[in-house]
């Protein structure tokens, strides 16, 4: 049930975000530590423009360490 809810939340207004978020959910989420899973869920609560800017601008100073690690994983999947 949790994965279905997260998959729905990965559906965004930008196709690029959809792909990046879904790729992380499918490939990394299940094996990530609980702290990073919670961080991913917290990132999904961000508005699309904010999340997109974090991905593009590669800034993460405002994020906690777990969110910064998830964001780094998202950037890696964006580039692959």
Image (tube, helix red, strand yellow):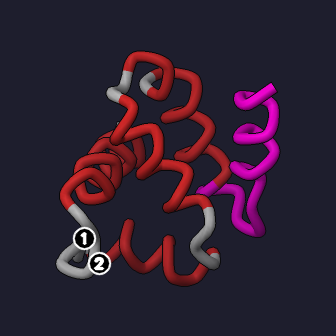
Q: Is residue 2 above or below residue 76?
A: above
Residue under pointer 2: 57
Left-right relation of 3 to 77: right
* Between 29 and 22, the one nearer to me in the picture: 29
* Between 51 and 78, the one nearer to me in the picture: 51
Residue density around tag 2, few if under 14, some if 14–19, many if 20 or more, within 10 Å: few
* Quadrant in the picture for residue 44: bottom right
Left-right relation of 38 to 19: left
Residue 14 in magenta stretch: yes
Q: Are marks 2 and 1 in contact (CB under 8 Å)?
A: yes
* Between 25 and 65, the one nearer to me in the picture: 65
**Residue drawn where x is 56% and y is 32% of the image:** 25
Q: Which residues are magenta?
A: 1-17
Label 2 element class: helix
Label 1 element class: loop
Rendering coords of residue 32 (x, y %): 36, 26
User: Gap in Å between the C-alphas at discs 2 and 1?
Assistant: 4 Å
């Amino acid at each position: 049930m949790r994965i279905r809810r997260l998959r729905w939340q990965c559906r965004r207004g930008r196709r690029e975000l959809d792909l990046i978020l879904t790729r992380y959910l499918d490939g990394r989420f299940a094996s990530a530590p609980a702290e990073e899973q919670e961080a991913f869920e917290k990132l999904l609560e961000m508005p699309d423009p904010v999340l997109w800017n974090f991905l593009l601008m590669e800034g993460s100073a405002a994020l906690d360490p777990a969110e910064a690690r998830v964001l780094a994983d998202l950037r890696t999947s964006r580039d692959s």
